[in-house]
Image (tube, rainbow, N blue to C red):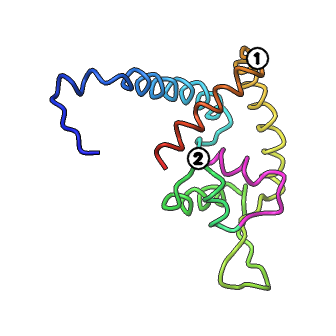
Amino acid sequence: MNVELDSKTAAKQPFYPTVRELATTYQTFCAYDEAHIRETGLTPPQFDVICTLGNTSGMFMNQLAEKTLVTKGTLTGIVDRLEQKGLVRREVPPENRRCFLIVLTPEGEQLFEQIFPQHTLYLKERFDRLNPTELKEIQAALSRLKSIFQ
């Protein structure tokens, strides 16, 4: 589709209010979410890694990168800092010595057991303002929006 627009016509495209609402909603959610996360002493990416590893026996780095909201390029540094805090450790599995598992330490498990339920309740306070049908509709709309960019 090779359509040309001038700047005035481009600025009046009907999707721009949706883009703005999506961006401001994301920013508002992040501000609300991150304020609570920072109270745990973790950064949002560190929190994401701890919560992703919780209730698992560990994950390889590539699995962890796929399941978190953390880019692969920054994951090594995040894991390094969590390791320095004594919350995760790297384990080399005997069947594949070329890679390693990232596993929560007992301290990391204890932190996960404390912060994950607390944060879930924190978010639940707001999400409970939506009924199940609204939640499904929002999820479907966001999923549809994501699909047009893939």
Question: Image quadrant for the N terminus?
Answer: top left
Q: Position of residue 87 (x, y in %)?
A: 73, 55
N-terminal of the two: label 1 or label 2? 2
Name the residue at 79% across, 85% down: 95
Name the residue at 75% across, 54% down: 53
Q: Is 58 one of the magenta-colored residues? A: yes
Q: Position of residue 50 (x, y in %)?
A: 71, 50
Note whether 57 is above or below 14 in the view shown: below
Q: Is residue 9 left or right of residue 52?
A: left
Helix, strand or loop for disc 2: helix
Looking at the image, the residue that sits furthest to the left is 6
Seen from the viewer's position, the closer of residues 40 and 51 is 51
Graded by Cα atoms within 10 Å as few (under 14), some (14 to 19) or many (20 or more), the crowding at tag 2 reads some
Q: Amino acid at mark 2?
A: Pro
Seen from the viewer's position, the closer of residues 134 and 78 is 134
Note whether 28 is above or below 52 in the view shown: above
Q: Is residue 72 left or right of residue 92?
A: left
Q: Which residues are magenta?
A: 46-59
Q: Is residue 29 left or right of residue 149?
A: right
Helix, strand or loop for disc 1: loop
Q: For residue 6, which numbered disc appears in the image?
A: none
* Residue occupied by mark 1: 131
Disc 1 to disc 2, C-alpha distance: 29 Å
* Residue occupied by mark 2: 45
Note whether 136 is above or below 72 in the view shown: above
Q: Is residue 68 left or right of residue 96?
A: left
Q: Position of residue 52 (x, y in %)?
A: 72, 51
Name the residue at 73% across, 24% down: 122
Give the quarter of the image for residue 5: top left
Q: Amino acid at mark 1?
A: Asn
Give the quarter of the image for residue 23: top left
